[in-house]
Amino acid sequence: MPADNRRPPRTETRIIRTRARASQHREQVTPIYMASGFTFDSAEQARAVYGGEQPGFVYTRWDNPNSAELTARLCELEGAEAGLPMASGMAALFTILAGLLNSGDHLVASRSLFGATHQLLTTILPRWGISHTYADCELTDTWPGLFRPETRLCLVETPSNPGLTLVDLAWVAQLCRERDVLLVVDNTFATPVIQRPLALGADLVVHSTTKFLDGQGRTIGGVVLGDRLVINELTHFARQTGPTLSPFNSWLLSQSLETLSLRMERHCANALALAEWLSTRAGVEAVRYPFLPSHPQAALARRQMAAGGGVVTFEVSGGLPAGRRFLDGLKMCNIVANLGDVRTTVTHPASTTHSALTDGERRATGITPGLIRVSVGLEHIDDIVADIDQAIRG
Ligand SMILES: *Cc1c(COP(=O)(O)O)cnc(C)c1O
């Protein structure tokens, strides 16, 4: 992937200036390559490109100029050697777990996981004899005892969805390195703008690009990034199983990355302001945000994150009925299961994203019946606060 003629030093510049080679039309912005296959000049060229001896594209289930541009930009963002764009965040997670683990293998996972990731570990992987043990994020003393001789992989999500619990990445990377266990970090909530797990020792980073990376609520997508040898292994798995990201979604996502750092600055500033305001508002309990001093892991947050992220959680006094009344009272903020949008979106995890968990599983991951998750958007902060204020008042 050729960058523009100079190689500028800063990430924001590199994201914008890294692009697919222009066609003979010299377009300023990369077009969408809606082509399932690519042609060759000769039998020899077809053989060489197909075999990976020569650069080029073969077939869009494998690769495409749009997905290649997206991958190059994501690698710049995460500081990764290689990457693999996928049709969704779950496709990325499934590709990692099914592509790297064998029957009889075991993994350790942080307990606070995205609902579908939890379902993948508990209802799908056991069918192939792959087992897991959950580790409680805040009980770090218990972690070393959870690894077994057959533990191959450790999966953590930090900050977690929706509990906003953190895992100390440098610490867990060391734990994994000593045991020859691959560390996979779901970096969806932080984004590489505020947290770069590979630099802290992780082997692979996974994203649901559906969230802040797209940031405009348009596409479903995912990506795995990391060491070239591991990505090569996953590429082999993905090329045969087919969870490819389409050229159109790759193109949209690649453009979204051009504004990512700008958007994250505003998401984080608005989220911090909302969290601070909620902390002083009567009728609100348990406000949680990584950069609030009241967060139990606030010191760790400041150490491994450049900002607190775009998500705030809280409870309205009065439990489940009060939480439901609050949602029904919102006039501007959308009630959506998704997050990471320019629009402020509000979710009630217990009845939506984490409804498939048992009461006990929800309690263990800090999802109380009245918990409200706000993905703070890019509207003016005064309008966000005003809407939430009037909905709390009821
Ligand atoms: C949304 C999400 C996923 C799943 O991603 P999809 O794009 O919806 O498949 C995985 N992990 C986290 C932390 C998420 O928020």
Image (tube, rainbow, N blue to C red):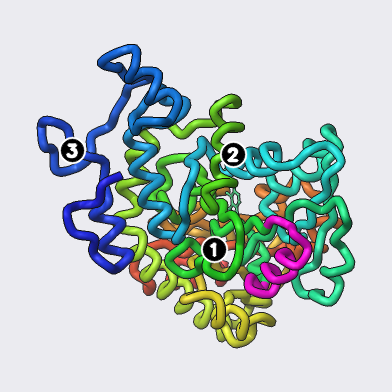
In three-dimensional space, the C-alpha distance between marks 3 and 2, rounded to whole angstroms, equals: 29 Å
- First along the sequence among labels 3 and 2: 3
Check residue 11 in the rendering and tell me which mark sits there, or answer none: none
Q: Between 308 and 229, which is closer to the camera in this rendering?
A: 229
Magenta span includes 180: yes
Residue 190's spot in the image, x, y percent? 52, 64
Quadrant where the image shows the N terminus: top left
Check residue 22 in the rendering and tell me which mark sits there, or answer none: 3
For the magenta stretch, what is the residue range? Answer: 168-182
Residue 320's spot in the image, x, y percent? 73, 61
- First along the sequence among labels 1 and 3: 3
Q: Between 231 and 312, which is closer to the camera in this rendering?
A: 231
- Which residue is disc 1 drawn over? 198
Answer with left or right where residue 42 lies relative to residue 222: left
Quadrant where the image shows the C terminus: bottom right
Check residue 234 in the rendering and tell me which mark sits there, or answer none: 2
Query: Height in image: 8 above or below 119?
Result: below
